[in-house]
Amino acid sequence: MLLNRNHSCHPLYRIARSLLLNRYSLAFLYLRGSGIEIGALHNPLRVSPRARVRYVDRMSVPDLRRQYPELKKKKLVPVDFVADGELLESVGDNSQEFVIANHFLEHCQNPLLALENMFRVLCPEGTLYLALPDSRYTFDRQRPVTPLEHLLRDYREGPDWSRRGHFLEWAHLVNGVRDQVEAEKQAEELMTMNYSIHYHVWSQFEMLEMLHVLRQQHPLDIEVMHRRKDEVIFIIRKGA
Ligand SMILES: C[S@@+](CC[C@H](N)C(=O)[O-])C[C@H]1O[C@@H](n2cnc3c(N)ncnc32)[C@H](O)[C@@H]1O
């Protein structure tokens, strides 16, 4: 029987769930009008014809090609405008019906500021479509989750105080470099090329903690929180 007490473990249930609830079906249900996607790269969110998306990235496509040689066989999204997605300086307040940020926030040095700016550009009742990798299921699994206090300090003081530490941790715990001198050398190289690492890592609970902090400044509602494979998808509505 499909719907017994253990129905959520049944393979058919899992198949039905992933067919019905996925990035695209949620986008289809919740996104319409005009908006932006930050950092779509090779994996833009598929949206319904009711949604018009402009693509923002920190680099032009040729520069992204140089930064990600491993994607040489993939098509990259044409970037409509180059901007720092943490600041979105060229995007007007209350101007977007939606903002999509999939696997982008962990690349931000100051995630609370980035979220604040996403809320700034959203119109009242606009939608933030946010997918975040859950570090327990990714190459970040060896890294400690980022404490909320760290994010608050990045927000208050700016993120420079922790930049080097993030690159070193990346060399040690993602790239598996054991030797300290070698790790420092690698961290230096990555910083010089301004490589976009995952600065911060979260599991689902720390994601909620971060949104709770945001809610103290900006009225918002979480319409959907859906854990899928290695990521958690949030559909967040800005208050009126
Ligand atoms: C891991 S890729 C995400 C790809 C895709 N969205 C997905 O869901 O698989 C991260 C993207 O964020 C972009 N990015 C990183 N930091 C950025 C910044 N400060 N401003 C704008 N884009 C940034 C990168 O260039 C890259 O395109």
Image (tube, grey):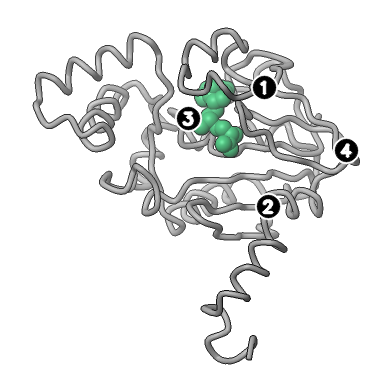
Dot 3 beta carbon under 8 Å from ligand 1: yes
Amino acid at circle 3: Cys
First along the sequence among labels 2 and 1: 1
The number of numbered badges drawn on the structure is: 4
Q: What residue is rendered at 70% in x and 59% in y?
A: 223
**In whole angstroms, how far apart are the C-alphas of marks 3 and 2?**
19 Å
Q: Quadrant of residue 104?
A: top right
Horizontal and vertical percent position of residue 121 = 72, 31
> In this rendering, would 227 be left or right of 153?
right
Q: Decide which of 17, 80 is in the foreground and name it.
A: 17
> In this rendering, would 59 be left or right of 230?
right
Dot 1 beta carbon under 8 Å from ligand 1: yes
- The residue that disc 4 covers is 33
- The residue that disc 3 covers is 108
- Of circles 1 and 3, the one toward us is 1
- The residue that disc 1 covers is 56
Amino acid at circle 1: Val
